Image: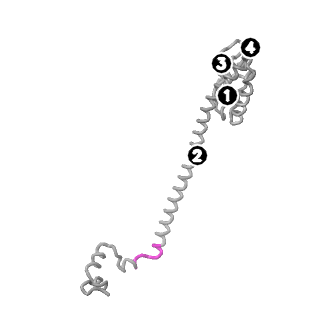
Amino acid sequence: MSDPGMPGADDIRGTDLDEELDDEGLEPDEAELDELDDDALLSELVAERDDFRDALLRVKAEFDNYRKRVARERDTMVQQASARLVAELLTILDSCDAAIVQGATDVEPVHKALLDLLVKEGLEVLPATDVPFDPHLHEAVLHEEGDGTESVVVETLRTGYVWHGTVLRPAMVRVRG
């Protein structure tokens, strides 16, 4: 039921609206549709699909790289934070060492417990004496003449530590040679 004063869909079809759409290129005419070959259309669709697939694979690879980089950065930040904490705890170990040297035996269990915990987490104590001097691991504060061959650590004045393969604090040593 349409209003007699209102034009129906059949009345609009033959108007200038169809001509305007054709002039603007919004509706393809039948000649254009016949010109498009099914093979050409298929090859265009395949090319477009391949472009989208390549873009998807690139974005996926970039995201995987981003995720790996973020995981590495997070691990590095955790390692740095734990290294700072362990470096602060070394002063407690030094205090315990000094107390033990002075004869305070009641500090030994605390020293052992703290050192065992840190060693379990990745702390390494640098070798004390009778090892070749390594400037990366040792800080020579005293030197005495030797037989002229290689320098050897004679005494450790302050213990050195390595945290997960990185020298946290070099050992202060007396060297002969």
**C-alpha distance separating marks 1 and 4:** 29 Å
- SS assignment for the magenta stretch, majority: helix
Label 1 or label 4, whichever comes before in sequence order = 4
The C terminus, quarter of image: top right
Q: Which residue is mark 4?
A: 147
**C-alpha distance separating marks 4 and 3:** 18 Å
Viewed as shown, does residue 113 lie left or right of 136? Answer: right
Q: Which residue is mark 2?
A: 71
Q: Nearer the viewer, residue 174 or 113?
A: 113
Residue 140: mark: 3
**C-alpha distance separating marks 2 and 1:** 27 Å
Give the residue furthest to the front.
106
- Tag 3: residue type? Ala
- Residue lying at 67% horizontally and 21% vertically, measured from the top left: 158
Q: Can see residue 29?
A: yes
Residue 15: give x, y in percent of width and height: 26, 82
